[in-house]
Amino acid sequence: MEKFEKIEEIHISKAIEEIDNNGVPEGRESTGYDVYKDNDDDPPKYYPPKYLIWLAYGYANDEKLEPGSTYKKLAYKILEKYGFKFRNKYGRTDQLKIK
């Protein structure tokens, strides 16, 4: 997991730029929660957390993860560390608990 520790905010920013330019490929959409960051965007832009970290991992390590890799909780922790917030895609009011 030490390669995940190389992910910095700049890598996440590059991943966001890639998603903004190219969209999210079919099958890489989020299933429960999207992430966003409070800023001047009105409304905020939402991103699939696992795909966002998958891209950021590639920028940080110059290699790609296998798409089916299990790193969802780790992705949430990294994104929370950099100030991202989580939105339930289906309107449920339960809060995401990151441990």
Image (cartoon, helix red, strand yellow):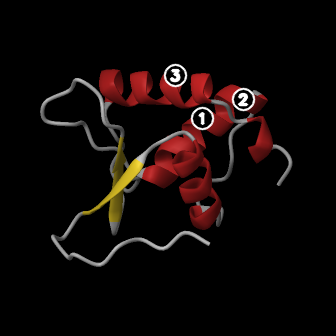
Is label 2 in a helix, a strand or a loop?
helix
Residue contact at pointers 3 and 1, CB within 8 angstroms: yes
Packing grade of label 2 (10 A; few <14, some 14-19, many >=20) is: some
How far is mark 3 from mark 1, CA to CA? 7 Å
Residue 45 point in image, percent of width and height: 25, 36
Q: Are marks 2 and 1 in contact (CB under 8 Å)?
A: yes
- The residue to which callout 1 is attached is 56
At a point 58% along the width and 54% down the height, the residue shown is: 75
User: Which amino acid is tagged 2?
Assistant: Ala
Sequence order check, earlier mark of 3 and 1: 3
Looking at the image, residue 36 lies above or below residue 40: below
> Which image quadrant is residue 27 in?
bottom left
Q: Can see residue 67?
A: no
Q: Which mark is residue 60?
A: 2
Quadrant location of the N terminus?
A: bottom right
Crowd class of label 1 (few under 14; some 14 to 19; many from 20; radius 10 Å): many
Describe residue 34's horizontal placement relative to residue 14 as left or right: left
At 35% from the left and 73% from the top, the residue drawn is 95
Q: Residues within 10 Å of mark 3 (few under 14, many from 20)?
A: some
Label 3 to label 2, Cα distance in Å?
A: 10 Å
Residue to which mark 3 is pinned = 14
Depth check: give the residue in front, 11 or 99.
Answer: 99
Seen at 66% across and 53% down, the residue is 66
Instruction: Classify 40 as above or below 3.
Output: above
Name the residue type under label 1.
Answer: Ala
Task: Give the x, y percent position of residue 8.
Answer: 67, 31
Location of residue 73 (image quadrant): bottom right
Considering depth in this image, is 87 or 1 the residue closer to the camera? Answer: 87
Residue 85 in sight in this render: yes
In the displayed structure image, the side of residue 65 where residue 86 appears, left or right: left
Q: What residue is shown at x 62% (from left), y 72% (from top)?
A: 99
